[in-house]
Image (spheres, grey):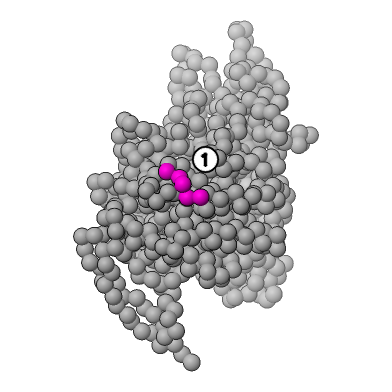
Amino acid sequence: MKLKNIMKCRVLSITELPQASITVLLCISLTANGQQSAPQQKAKDKLSVATSVEVNGYVGGKFDASYNNRILAQDVKRLVEPFTVRDEHSCWQGEFWGKWFTSAALAYQYNPSPMLHAKLKSAAEGLMATQTPDGYIGNYAPESRLKAWDIWGRKYSMLGLIAYYDITKDKKALEAATRGADFLIRELGEQHANIVQMGNHRGMAASSVLEPICQLYNRTGNQKYLAFAEEIVRQWETPEGPQLISRAAVPVGKRFPKPEKSWYGWEQGQKAYEMMSCYEGLLELYRITGKEAYKTAAEQTWQSITESEINIAGSGSAMEAWFSGKEKQTMPIAHYQETCVTVTWIKFNQQLLRLTGEAKYADAIEQTFYNALLGAMRPDGSDWAKYTPLAGQRLEGSEQCGMGLNCCNASGPRGLFTIPHTSVMQSVQGISLNFYIDGTYRLHTPGNQTIGVVQKTDYPRSGKIEIMLELPKDEQMEIALRIPAWSSSSIVSVNGMTTEKVTPGDYLRLTRNWKNDDRISVELEMKGKVHRMGNQPEYVAVTRGPVLLTRDERLGNPALEAILAPVLNEDGTVDVTCRETSDANMWMLFSADFIPESYTEQGAKPVTVHFCDYASAGNTINGFPFFRVWMPQLYNPSN
């Protein structure tokens, strides 16, 4: 029996939307059985995730370590407890359940084990049991609701419940999320409250609820959620709002004056994590509406963050805010490079990569993943650093809100587990290889076959990647290979035949009739690139491929404070050798020749200097070795 569409219209009262000044007419499309039809998105993603992924090697070991020692090790009852007490007035305990749960949901997508499924079920049912009759899921006392971090915490509860619904199709989870959203909308309306004046950071923390509101619209078709989403964006552009669209072309560290009262209060309009969270929601709204201004604002902000904030390790922020930090990265910086910022930068880039298919977003993710993100993770995956400097020590963060962990412990795996299903993705044209990580990736071809893409590589230790296709029958399609922007000379061959026109910073698109056992070979240039910053003094740093080389006191002399100048080739690169290491806490060991400071007339001879990868620098199970990325150079007035 075919279901007949019925159009039902109703007028929402001012208690159902925060716009008390207007009456909104909503038409809700319903089917004859009472279920709302799924809405059609006006802007579709260019790329979609793989069906299943199995990752090997060093990176696979990191996924396993986080899965076993952080995700499965979490006591979920402790995360639920604040929702049963509901006596908070200012702290952010409400975020921890949702951050852990969304991390765990991504981990489950990667490895759907019965043990994790049971843990997700226990956590979801435990949270849903705390929902009050009016729909509230949160940890705030009634007199403090809508204030401080209350709506922020509700956002994470919604995100987690929606993720659980997507995994299990348990309608109770979706109903709990919708009841929570309905209560928020009703509560704002009853109090005639603007969401951008609630909570901290010019309303960015509270209004980042835009993301799950858009997700609820996509899963229910309820126009009330779309109207609320548009109302949030309208309020952004009021004088009290963060003006995330009209100020998108303004550098993110300069959008508002420096806070006079509280760095972490409502005045702070540069808060990095919350800002990017809002843009994630805006991109979800763009998919629904197709309004180009939303996408343009996100892209302009991405460009601003890239040009003015992101450092050589792929992250940024100080004291959790944007501060025009890219040009300051050689300095000692307080509370530098928060892991929550690192994670959200990866997630923001993944949103843009899915949407546009542009290589620059994959380049950005790769830089951050191999450096800032893995550098924040404890070697055994059990813990995450809250801040990770470019010089000094990787120190443990403090416990927050009496929860036994902090925001970055909960959030770190959210960045980590975006990587498996982003590495190889599918498109209307075929397959897109975004990251070269040893493993097997299964996807659907344009002809709806299941294709296996098998990567054999030790990348980024070397630049050699072998790719083999498992394809039931021949098919004409495109296989796109990302050529990193840093690889100025790359060689790609198909079944032994070398291809031409390999362009750095773009995808090499190979369209042909692909067969089972077809093989693609990729060899990326892995020269040591020298980066320079500053004038008095000048500093240098070295990268090899996507990996940032770092000096570590475990590697011995010369001392970290020694003045060392790289021995350059004619093209300005340095010769870097990748070596084996016996240190269990060190992934990669490198050596290169440098000229030490000398006061003899003829100068000193080069010496061999050892480096490790940034992720391993100062990162051990026991102890906190000192390390350094940027190396000061001698000032020479004759140059």
Residue 54 as seen in the image, left or right of residue 155: right
Q: Residue at x 29, y 63 (%)?
A: 15
Residue 166 as seen in the image, left or right of residue 32: right
Residue nearest the viewer, comparing 129 with 533: 129
Residue nearest the viewer, comparing 335 with 475: 335
Q: Does the magenta stretch include residue 173?
A: no
Residue nearest the viewer, comparing 75 with 434: 75
Q: Check the image and name the residue furthest to the bottom.
A: 1
Looking at the image, residue 364 lies above or below residue 558: below
Q: Quadrant of residue 179?
A: bottom left
Does residue 279 appear anywhere in the picture?
no
Looking at the magenta stretch, what is its main secondary structure?
loop
User: Which range of residues does the magenta coloring cover?
Assistant: 85-89
Q: Where is residue 567 in the image (x, y as percent from the top left)?
A: 62, 25
Q: Which residue is drawn at 46% across and 42% down?
A: 91
Q: Position of residue 624 (x, y in %)?
A: 66, 28
Q: Position of residue 279 (x, y in %)?
A: 40, 52
Q: Quadrant of residue 423?
A: bottom right
Q: Check the image and name the residue furthest to the left.
A: 21
Q: Residue at x 70, y 59 (%)?
A: 115
Residue 446 as seen in the image, left or right of residue 310: right
Looking at the image, residue 578 lies above or below residue 491: above
Q: What residue type is labelled 1?
A: Cys
Does residue 333 appear anywhere in the picture?
yes
Residue 299 as seen in the image, left or right of residue 469: left
Q: Write down the residue under mark 1.
A: 401
Instruction: Label 1, secondary structure: give it.
Output: loop
Q: Residue at x 63, y 74 (%)?
A: 449
